[in-house]
Amino acid sequence: MRKLCLITGASAGIGAATAKLAAKAGYDLALNYRSDQAGAEAVAADAQSDGAQTLIVQADVSDPDQIENMFAQIDARFGKLDALVNNAGIVDVATRVEELTYERLRRMFDVNVIGAIMVAKEAVRRMQQQPSGGAIVNVSSVAARLGSANEYVDYAATKAALDTFSKGLAEEVATQNIRVNVVRPGITDTEIHAKGGAPDRARRLAHRIPMQRAGAPEEIAQSILYLLSDEASYVSGAFLDVSGGR
Ligand code: NAP
């Protein structure tokens, strides 16, 4: 029987790469996206060609009603949830702290922290009902320990919050056969940089990385799949930096 994995932000970048790999690894998929329907449909078609059943669910994770509706659709279609990749996330344009606006902070924390926690909460409620439990991977960033000075300290702070949340949640649900881990990518070659107004960021900052190159989304996805898998059966509350040595 194929396991069911929900991936938030599956229409592009790391989420899309994770979906492709998860389908090959034998998961059925609930694929969440916010605005890029064509991207989500392309990912679903790819996953189906690898034998996965797919459900595309549009939801903005910063909206609790939309999260509730997303899980209702998953319940109706699959009636279970074995794995969650809490991947949806945003950055914003590079700026210094004195230029940060309240609206920007609100949005950043609503999506990257409150959204991720609300999605994890709904996932845990379902995994708790299953003797087989489940596995959660939260996608953070090395920014959580580097701080992202002069770029986006607010983004770094959201990822640090996600790290701490993950540690606590892992301990809370450990006896319920639910594992919670964190993958912290370094600079990865996706469209997130263009969305933050710096399309050349991955190439421009490669010199700061010991390996002298940005990561590929597939390289992040491999680590996510490992932490979801039974091969990581004794791994919980762990942080895996996938960052070229930085
Ligand atoms: P990306 O290419 O921009 O993709 C982001 C995905 O998240 C898209 O599918 C997007 O959906 C979705 N998304 C954004 N806001 C959402 C919301 N409010 N509700 C639901 N979905 C939403 O980004 P990425 O580089 O793959 O990043 C994925 C994760 O990795 C993020 O959490 C990011 O912080 C983290 N990360 C990335 C890097 C990097 O260098 N790329 C480094 C460290 C950590 P739509 O396009 O459909 O709106």
Image: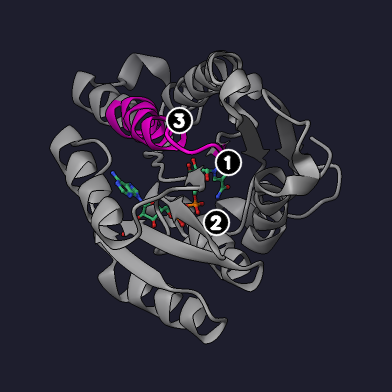
In the image, 133: left or right of 8?
right
User: Regarding mark 2 in the picture, which secondary structure is present there?
Assistant: helix
Q: Amino acid at mark 2?
A: Ile
Number of the label disc, if any, that sits on residue 128? 3
Q: Nearer the viewer, residue 150 or 143?
A: 143
Instruction: Name the residue: 42% across, 82% down.
Output: 45
In the image, 151: left or right of 122?
right
Binning the other alpha carbons within 10 Å of mark 2 as few (below 14), some (14 to 19) or many (20 upward) gives many
Binning the other alpha carbons within 10 Å of mark 3 as few (below 14), some (14 to 19) or many (20 upward) gives some
Is residue 113 in the magenta section?
Answer: yes
Is residue 23 in the magenta section?
Answer: no
First in residue order: circle 3 vs circle 2: 2
Residue corresponding to mark 2? 14
Instruction: Name the residue: 28% across, 28% down.
Output: 110
Q: Which of the 4 quarters of the picture holds residue 18? A: bottom right
The picture places residue 177, in percent across and down from the top left corner, at: 61, 30
Q: Is residue 8 above or below residue 139?
A: below
